[in-house]
Image: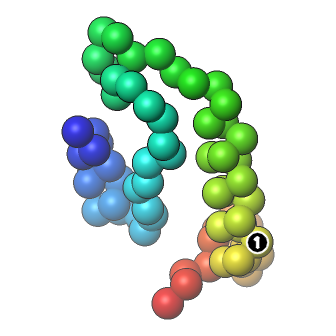
């Protein structure tokens, strides 16, 4: 189930929800085993987002610029 509390976050700030592939059971299932090899894939996705969308420094706290 992909809902979690993400809809609540989206009501307050823009964002995105994505899955990083992993074979087998999903989180919250008793047979779930985290595959640490997917950490690098997730990190690459976030680095690419920062590089392609950039940061806005117009406020005291850096925020991602909107892509629209």
In this view, the residue farthest toward the front is 23
Instruction: Name the image quarter holding residue 40.
Output: top right
Q: Is residue 27 visible?
A: no
Measured as percent of width and height from the top left, residue 24 is found at 39, 25
Which residue sits furthest bottom? 68
- 10 Å neighbourhood of mark 1: few (<14), some, or many (≥20)? few
What residue does disc 1 label? 51
Q: Is residue 66 above or below residue 16?
A: below
Q: Is residue 45 left or right of residue 15?
A: right
Q: How many marks?
A: 1
Farthest residue, direction top: 30
Residue drawn at (49%, 90%) of the image: 68
Residue shown at the point (44%, 62%) measured from the top left: 16
- 51 sits to left or right of 12: right
Place residue 60 in its image quadrant.
Answer: bottom right
In the image, residue 62 above or below residue 17: below
Q: Position of residue 7 (x, y in %)?
A: 26, 54
**Colour convention of the picture:** rainbow
Q: Quadrant of the N terminus?
A: top left
- Position in image of residue 37 (x %, y %): 67, 31
Front in this rendered view, residue 41 or 52? 41
Q: Secondary structure at mark 1?
A: helix
Q: Nearer the viewer, residue 56 or 23?
A: 23
**Rendered view: 61 above or below 44:** below
Report the residue at 55% width, 84% height from top: 67
Q: Is residue 20 visible?
A: yes
Q: Residue at x 71, y 65 (%)?
A: 48
In-image side of 52 versus 66 (left or right): right
Residue 5, position as x, y percentages in the image: 28, 42
Indicate left or right for 27 with 33 as reference. Answer: left
């Amino acid at each position: 189930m992909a809902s979690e509390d993400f809809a609540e976050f989206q009501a307050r700030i823009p964002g995105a929800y994505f899955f990083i592939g992993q074979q087998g059971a999903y989180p919250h299932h008793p047979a779930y085993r985290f595959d640490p090899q997917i950490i690098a894939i997730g990190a690459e996705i976030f680095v690419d987002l920062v590089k392609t969308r950039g940061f806005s420094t117009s406020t005291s706290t850096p925020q991602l610029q909107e892509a629209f």
